[in-house]
Amino acid sequence: MPALSFAGSDFSVRGDLVEAHARAWAAIAAPGTWLDGARRVAVAAEIRKARDCPHCARIKAALSPNGVPGAHESLGELGAAEIELIHRVVGDPGRLSEKWSQSVLALGLADGEYVEIVGIVAMVMMLDTFTRGLGTRDTPLPAPVAGEPTRHRPAGARKKAAWLPLTEPEDATEADGPMYPNPKAGYIYRGLSLVPQSLRDYWALANCHYLPGPVIYRFDQSISELRALERPQVEIIAARVSAMHQCVY
């Protein structure tokens, strides 16, 4: 992948953000835990296709997302389960349900593949939203990197407080690698913990856009050494964006 830049924008971009975006695209192109590089890049391409899917628009406009006739307009590179997962998470995430998630798994997708794909959706949406905010074009998709997925499943992963298994901080092992900023990390940190590498890749990107994990809980201290905005300003923006996306956080 060529050197990443945001040429054409009227805004200057922090160096750590440029580096974070470059690392994120490299991670998406590389073999993951359950998906190889080619499949991961195909997921990224389908995420962009889902943004303009007419069927997704009909689902979004419907009173209920269930029973809307038609099919997703896809690139044809992925299976039915992957396309349904990607399009619904991109197009109408606020109205998903556990029953729906189980229907996706019933189409033949493994729970680890499901979580890895959701992790890629979260990353690509963040990457592309950033470039659109700058007024620049989407970053070209990287070429996939050859290699085999690791197929690592945390020994402590269990279905407990979510639709799919999680790895609670107390159940994580050395083999899983680092996952949490502290032993009491909230559930927003645990959502991708069935696939630790996806969790690490996502938060490496998210922390640069928001705040590093250990700093998030420093409500009584200035963050001026890290960001141009002060904490109240950051939180006002975050709260507004969360409300617009119907996010309970």
Image: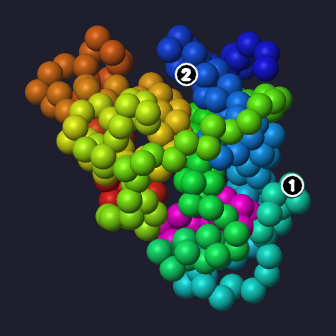
Say left or right for 116 vs 209. Answer: right
Left or right of 168 in this view: 208? right
On the image, the x and y values in percent for residue 73 come to 83, 66
Q: Which of 96 and 35 is in front in this view?
A: 35
Taking 205 as reference, is 86 left or right? right
Answer whether residue 209 is visible to the viewer in this image: no
Q: In the structure shown, which secondary structural element does the residue marked by tag 1 occupy?
A: loop
On screen, residue 109 above or below 58: above
Q: Position of residue 18 (x, y in %)?
A: 59, 17
The answer to whether 68 is drawn above or below residue 123 in the figure is below
Residue 183 among magenta residues: no
What is the span of residues highlighted in magenta in the rendered image?
A: 81-96
Q: Quadrant of residue 12?
A: top right
**Crowding at mark 1 (Cα within 10 Å: few <14, some 14-19, many 20+):** few
Q: Which residue is at the front of the view, 117 or 211?
A: 117
Quarter of the image that includes the N terminus: top right
Q: Which residue is drawn at 88% across and 59% down?
A: 76
Display colour scheme: rainbow
Mark in the foreground, 1 or 2: 1
The residue located at (47%, 50%) in the rendering is 194
Q: Is residue 93 magenta?
A: yes
> Which residue is drawn at the image coordinates 74% and 63% (left, top)?
83
**Label 2 belongs to which residue?**
20
Q: Kindly identify the residue that appears in the image at 55 percent across and 84 percent down.
A: 64
Image coords of residue 147 (percent x, y): 77, 31
In what element is the residue under mark 2?
A: helix
Mark with earlier residue (1, 2): 2
Query: Residue at label 1?
Result: 77
- Which amino acid is tagged 1? Glu
Q: Can residue 64 be seen in this view?
A: yes
Pointer 1 with pointer 2, Cβ within 8 A: no
